[in-house]
Image (tube, rainbow, N blue to C red):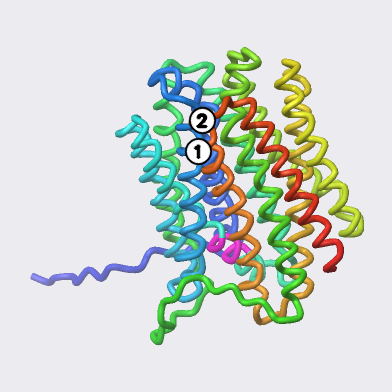
C-alpha cells in the first residue's frame, strides 16, 4: 500500500493592488468604529443616570489610548512588519467591540474606549506607511498621502452616522452596532493575513525604544509652532465629541440620535472638504482661513447655546471642522518642508503626538471642571481658552515660517 505525504502549502498572498484596498478598508473600518459611540452616549447617560463629566472621561480614555499607543508602539511595524501590526491593531478593535458588548457599564465603557484608542494609535502609523509602500509597487511615483488622509476623515465621519441610523431604527441600539463591527473586524483580520508584507525581515532587530521625535536645530521654531497649532485645532474635535451629544439632547431638546451622528460627521467631512477646496492656496492663506474659521466657530457655539439656536450650533461645528482640517494640514506641511528627509517621519510623529494630546488633555480638564461648574460656563471657558491658544499658536507659526 502506498502512502502519500501531504505537505501544507502556504496560503497564496494577495496582489499588491488588492492588498492596498484591503488595508484601506480595514483602516476605514477601524476609524469608523472609533466614532461609533459618539451619538450613543446620551443613551448610556439616560440608562445609567451618570453626569456629563463621565462622558468626558470615557472620551478622554480613547484619546489617551491613542497617544500612548502612538508613542509606545506606533513605530514598531518598521521592524516587526506592517501586516503583523495591522492584524494586531484590528484585533484590538475587535476586543474593544467585545468589551462594549460584555461590559456595558461605565468602567467597561472606559476600558473599551482605551483599548480602541490603542488599536487606532498602532494602526494609524502602520496603515499610512503600508498604503504608501503598496501603492509604490503598483503606481511608482504616485503619492498615497492624500488618499490616506481622506480615508482617515471618511472613516471618522462614517462612524457616527452608522450608529445614529442604527440607534434610530433598531430595537437594541447599544448592542447592534458593536455586533456588526465585531463581525466586520473578524472578517478584516482573516483577509489581512494575506496582504503582502512591505518590510524586509531583519534578524537583527533594533533594541526597543519608544517613538523618538527628532527635530533638526534649524527646524525647531517651525516645529514647536506647528505642534502648538496641531494641539490647538484638535481641541475643537474634543469639544464637539465630548459635549455635543449632551448639548443636542439637553439644551436643544433634539431627540434624534441620527442628528447627533450627522453633527459629529460634519466636523470630519468639513475638515476633509476644506483640505481639498483650498489645496491650491498658499499655506499662509490656508492657515489664516483655517484659524479664522475656528475663531468664528468658537464664538458661534457658545452663542447658540445661550440663544437656543440649533441651526447656529450646527453651522458652528461645520465651520470649525473646516478650520480644524486646514490648520492641521498647514502644520504638517510646514514641518514636512523643513524636516531633514532622513528624519521626516520622526519629526512628523511629534506633530501627531501634539495633535492627539490636544484631544486628550483638554477633555480631561473639562471633565474635572464639570464636577464643580455648570456645563454652559465650562463651554464658554473652554472656548475662550482655545481662542487664546489658537491666536498665540497661529501667530507663532506665521512668524516662524
Q: Residue at position x 39%, y 85% from top? A: 203
Q: Residue at position x 66%, y 34% from top? A: 265
Which residue has dot 1 on it?
Answer: 368
**Frontmost residue, 190 versus 360:** 360
Residue 370 relative to residue 105: left or right: right
Asked whether the residues under the numbered discs 1 and 2 touch, taking CB atoms below 8 Å apart as contact, a structural biologist would say: yes
Q: Which residues are magenta?
A: 125-131
Which residue has dot 2 on it?
Answer: 372
Discs 1/2, front: 2
Q: Residue 327's spot in the image, x, y percent?
A: 77, 52
Q: Residue 180's spot in the image, x, y percent?
A: 44, 33
- Mark 2 Cα within 10 Å, few/some/many (few <14, many 20+)? few
**What is the quadrant of residue 386 in the picture?**
top right
Residue 82 relative to residue 172: left or right: right
- Looking at this view, name the residue that lies furthest to the left: 1
Disc 2 secondary structure class: loop
Q: Residue at position x 77%, y 69% from top? A: 222
Amino acid at each position: 500500500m502506498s502512502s502519500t505525504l501531504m505537505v501544507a502549502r502556504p496560503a497564496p498572498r494577495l496582489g499588491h493592488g488588492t492588498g492596498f484596498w484591503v488595508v484601506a478598508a480595514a483602516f476605514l473600518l477601524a476609524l469608523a468604529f472609533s466614532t461609533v459611540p459618539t451619538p450613543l452616549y446620551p443613551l448610556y447617560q439616560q440608562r445609567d443616570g451618570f453626569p456629563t463629566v463621565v462622558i468626558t472621561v470615557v472620551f478622554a480614555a480613547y484619546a489617551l489610548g491613542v497617544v500612548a499607543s502612538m508613542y509606545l508602539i506606533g513605530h514598531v511595524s518598521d521592524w516587526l512588519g506592517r501586516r503583523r501590526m495591522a492584524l494586531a491593531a484590528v484585533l484590538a478593535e475587535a476586543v474593544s467591540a467585545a468589551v462594549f458588548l460584555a461590559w456595558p457599564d461605565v468602567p467597561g465603557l472606559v476600558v473599551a474606549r482605551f483599548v480602541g484608542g490603542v488599536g487606532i494609535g498602532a494602526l494609524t502609523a502602520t496603515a499610512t506607511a503600508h498604503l504608501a509602500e503598496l501603492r509604490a509597487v503598483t503606481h511608482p511615483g504616485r503619492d498615497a498621502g492624500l488618499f490616506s488622509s481622506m480615508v482617515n476623515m471618511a472613516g471618522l465621519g462614517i462612524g457616527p452616522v452608522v450608529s445614529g441610523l442604527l440607534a434610530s431604527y433598531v430595537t437594541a441600539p447599544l448592542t447592534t452596532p458593536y455586533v456588526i463591527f465585531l463581525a466586520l473586524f473578524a472578517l478584516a483580520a482573516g483577509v489581512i493575513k494575506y496582504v503582502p508584507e512591505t518590510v524586509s525581515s531583519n534578524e537583527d532587530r533594533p533594541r526597543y525604544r519608544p517613538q523618538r521625535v527628532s527635530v533638526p536645530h534649524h527646524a525647531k521654531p517651525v516645529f514647536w509652532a506647528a505642534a502648538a497649532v496641531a494641539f490647538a485645532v484638535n481641541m475643537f474635535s474634543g469639544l464637539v465629541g465630548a459635549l455635543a451629544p449632551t448639548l443636542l439632547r439637553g439644551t436643544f431638546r433634539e431627540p434624534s440620535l441620527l442628528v447627533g451622528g450627522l453633527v459629529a460627521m460634519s466636523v470630519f467631512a468639513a475638515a476633509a472638504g476644506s483640505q481639498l477646496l483650498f489645496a491650491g492656496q498658499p499655506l499662509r492663506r490656508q492657515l489664516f482661513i483655517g484659524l479664522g474659521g475656528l475663531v468664528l466657530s468658537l464664538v458661534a457655539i457658545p452663542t447658540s447655546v445661550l440663544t437656543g439656536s440649533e441651526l447656529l450650533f450646527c453651522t458652528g461645528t461645520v465651520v470649525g471642522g473646516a478650520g480644524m482640517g486646514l490648520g492641521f494640514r498647514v502644520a504638517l506641511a510646514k514641518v514636512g518642508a523643513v524636516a531633514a528627509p532622513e528624519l521626516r517621519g520622526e519629526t512628523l510623529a511629534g506633530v501627531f503626538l501634539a495633535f492627539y494630546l490636544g484631544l486628550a488633555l483638554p477633555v480631561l480638564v473639562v471633565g474635572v471642571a464639570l464636577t464643580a461648574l455648570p456645563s454652559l460656563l465650562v463651554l464658554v471657558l473652554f472656548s475662550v481658552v482655545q481662542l487664546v491658544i489658537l491666536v498665540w499658536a497661529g501667530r507663532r507659526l506665521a512668524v516662524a515660517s
